[in-house]
Image (tube, rainbow, N blue to C red):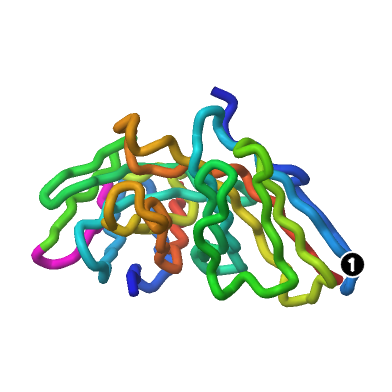
Amino acid sequence: DTGVSQNPRHKITKRGQNVTFRCDPISEHNRLYWYRQTLGQGPEFLTYFQNEAQLEKSRLLSDRFSAERPKGSFSTLEIQRTEQGDSAMYLCASRAPTFRQSGPEAFFGQGTRLTVV
Amino acid sequence: GDSVTQMEGPVTLSEEAFLTINCTYTATGYPSLFWYVQYPGEGLQLLLKATKADDKGSNKGFEATYRKETTSFHLEKGSVQVSDSAVYFCALAGGGIAGGTSYGKLTFGQGTILTVHP
């Protein structure tokens, strides 16, 4: 079990540029979540995938944000035309299928810290 | 909607002191409750969990009991160590229908910074 992996760990970009982050969940975890965490706050839910289907999106996810999970394994989160307000830690988490009766907990990656200058 | 409220922080203690971090929640149904810990520059690690009323979660000397009557899940440790210094987050996962589209989504409190001095 290699845990949830996120890349890159840090990203500095100029305002207006596009960025893409990658998340590799724990193998066999069919549920994948993206969260955003700003300084001094708890993580806030962005979006949720069950297998390759994106089933829920927060209103925090503006039109500039898009997430994919094309084969139900890894996921990408893209931010177009970045703004300074996008600066945050972006966290990915995965969870096992409910039918396996594993615990309800999600396992988090180490996050990607985005700084928009 | 679901919400989690943690005690105002930060909390500063001396080594071997007793720790309590208060957490209350608002949710429909029967949520699962969690404490996660975050060390500087890192992601979140699950510290403990409880899935139904009166359950006690415990790990590494930390404990929390799911109190449905007071909608609380306070974190306690009898004797803190310098290595416990971190940010602690209380969270809930909505108790919706199993397999439902929102099942497992976490709602977090704002976090409590704990600093333990030698």
The outermost residue toward the top is A1
Figure quadrant of residue A15: bottom right
In the rendered view, would you say B118 is above or below A66?
A: above
Q: Is residue A77 left or right of residue B17?
A: right
Q: Is residue B1 left or right of residue A5?
A: left
Residue sitting at 34 percent across and 55 percent down?
Answer: B93
Residue B100 location (% of width, % of height): 35, 53
Q: Is residue A72 left or right of residue B114?
A: right
The answer to whether residue B47 is seen in the rendering is yes
Residue sitting at 13 percent across and 52 percent down?
Answer: B53
Residue A110 location (% of width, % of height): 62, 44
Residue sitting at 62 percent across and 36 percent down?
Answer: A73
The region drawn magenta spans B69-78
Q: Who is closer to the viewer here, B9 or B47?
A: B47
In the rendered view, would you say B51 is above or below A102?
A: below
Q: Who is closer to the viewer here, B14 or B56?
A: B56
In the rendered view, would you say A105 is above or below B97?
A: above
The answer to whether residue B5 is seen in the rendering is no
Element under label 1? Answer: loop
Residue neighbourhood size for the residue with mark 1, other residues' Cα within 10 Å, grouped as few (<14), some (14–19), many (≥20): few
Residue sitting at 27 percent across and 46 percent down?
Answer: B77
Residue picked out by circle 1: A17
The amino acid beneath tag 1 is Gln
Q: Is residue A66 magenta?
A: no
Which chain is mark 1 on? A
In the rendered view, would you say B25 is above or below A2?
A: below
Residue A97 location (% of width, % of height): 41, 36
Of the 4 image quadrants, the one containing the N terminus of chain B is: bottom left
Q: Magenta: predominant secondary structure element?
A: loop
* Tally of numbered tags: 1
